[in-house]
Image: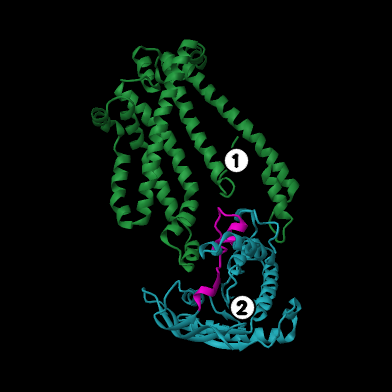
Chain colours: A cyan, B green
Amino acid sequence: MTRALSFRNVSMTFPDGTAALDDVSFDVGVGEFVTVVGPSGCGKSTLLRIASGLEHQSAGTVDVDRKNLGYVFQDATLLQWRTVRRNVALFAELDGLTPANRTQRVAETIDLVGLGGFEEKYPRQLSGGMKMRASLARALVMEPTMFLFDEPFGALDEINRERLNDELLALFTRSGFGSLFITHSIAEAVFLSTRVLVMSSRPGRIIGSFDVPFGYPRVPELRFEPAFGELAGAVSNTLRGAVAREVRQ
Amino acid sequence: MTDVVEAQAVAAGPDSAGAPPVDQRHRSDRRRSAIGIVGPIATFGVFVGVWYLMHYWALRALWDKPPFLVPAPHVVVKESFLDTERLTEMLRATRFTGYISLIGLGIAIVIGMLLAFAMAQAQWLERSVWPYLVALQAIPVIALTPLIGSIWGFGTVGRVVVCIIISMFPIVANTLFGLLSADRGQHDLFTLRGASRRTRMFRLQFPGALPAIFGGFRIAAGLSVIGAIVGELFFRRGEKGIGILLADYRSQNQVPEAYGAMIMAAVLGITLFALFGWVSHLVVGKWHESTRKTG
């Protein structure tokens, strides 16, 4: 399997002395969907900020092709003064694509995320779910080979979250990008991933890795299968162990 | 009305949770527009009522002062606005003062925004310039008028300089605040794409700052009118603006006319304020949440 992203012995200590990551190593292959779950404040977001180059690790090496990286933030971070169409076009614009080339791609991507008909709306006219779709489209437009997701659906209600999970998986199955997804929902992690990593906090360490045996495409009903529940339970136990250790300290 | 259309469009979309039912929106819209008309009329009524009360009762009863200090509204209207010659005189003066304030405001906008852009680019510049801007705002402009008058004369140029000095602060302050308040996540987007400072400024910081910038313009517009009038009141020379008329009427004990001149000055200020509100609505009204529809 070709590697899309690789972390080798990465540590991160902030200037104020906080140890966010400690000796983190893992790979994400092309076509692999890796999810990281962990208690809040355990340095999950830092992981993505380092992967994308927004921050630099204190030690270790990160290997990734940053030109072909898609990043979906926790907030939709749409530019309020741009319509959906022009928000989705932002990266294409910043990367210097010709307008002709841009128009076609943008229109296709908007359809792909189900925002057709909303091209000329401004962010304030969109619901939370639609904003996240627009944010997703903006990252998709450059057809990245590796995606970073920072709890993108964390602020949505459960119904919308599950629906966007289904649609994200459809996109993943279709395009086969590599994916590193941060969440604190275990169900979301198991449903989406080929592999789930569990992180402890302060400092962030990877304390468990679970391969998810279900193939793609995955149907929404998978969430109610006994095997799904078993795996979610195992992840949950490891996670609870991490939290308990933290409380004792 | 467009609000309702948008609400329907959104309600028809895939994730419509949270949008209120359309008919309920209709009703509250109608109620809002009724209040929108009745409110200002009622406020105006109270204003005129208090004015009459001052003239016929409060001045004498509360402060033991002669009623002519605040002439009755209908006397002010009759002496100032129903006399054609007087009205022409006041309109011409108001136009001249308006012209002075607009020139002053225009120059203040250019200088103020350039300064704010430079300050947003370099923190050392921001730190070094701020104290002087605050000082300029804190020093009463009256204290500077003799100097301004002796350098630039008491005509158009001197008055414009007063307008610039008095109206620049809110322009710099609001523009700078707007440019620096772009969301961190939005900055990250531009960092990820290796955007240059210029790209970041013109595609992120500047458009995001527009609502704040227009807010600054509106405050500055009112201040600029004050600047023009203060300049005239102090200089008392050159072409007659509304400030000079006011001073003339006062010195000749034409009290109702003096109040008429004050009303003209107020109307001028309100007009400029509304003008910038309208331009602001045109530019950012579509996307900025706090821009309410007026009129």
In the rendering, at what x and y percent does residue A97 appear? 55, 64
Q: Does A188 appear in magenta?
A: no
Q: Does A75 appear in magenta?
A: yes
Does B24 appear above or below B273?
A: below
Residue on which the image places disc 1: B293
Looking at the image, do the residues carrying marks 1 and 2 touch, with CB atoms under 8 Å apart?
no
Element type at mark 1? loop
In the rendering, at what x and y percent does residue B19 appear? 69, 54
Answer whether residue B60 is visible to the viewer in this image.
no
Q: Which residues are magenta?
A: A65-90
Q: Give neighbour class at mark 2: few <14, some 14-19, many 20+ (Cα, 10 Å).
A: many
> Is residue B125 or residue A90 the one in the foreground?
A90
Task: Give the position of the N terminus of chain A as an image quadrant.
Answer: bottom right
Instruction: Say which residue appears at 56% left-offset and 49% top-offset.
Output: B288
Q: Give neighbour class at mark 1: few <14, some 14-19, many 20+ (Cα, 10 Å).
A: few
Instruction: Say which residue appears at 39% left-offset and 80% top-offset.
Output: A58
Does A24 appear above or below A130?
A: below
Does B171 appear above or below B273?
A: below
**Kind of residue at disc 1:** Lys
Residue on which the image places disc 2: A177
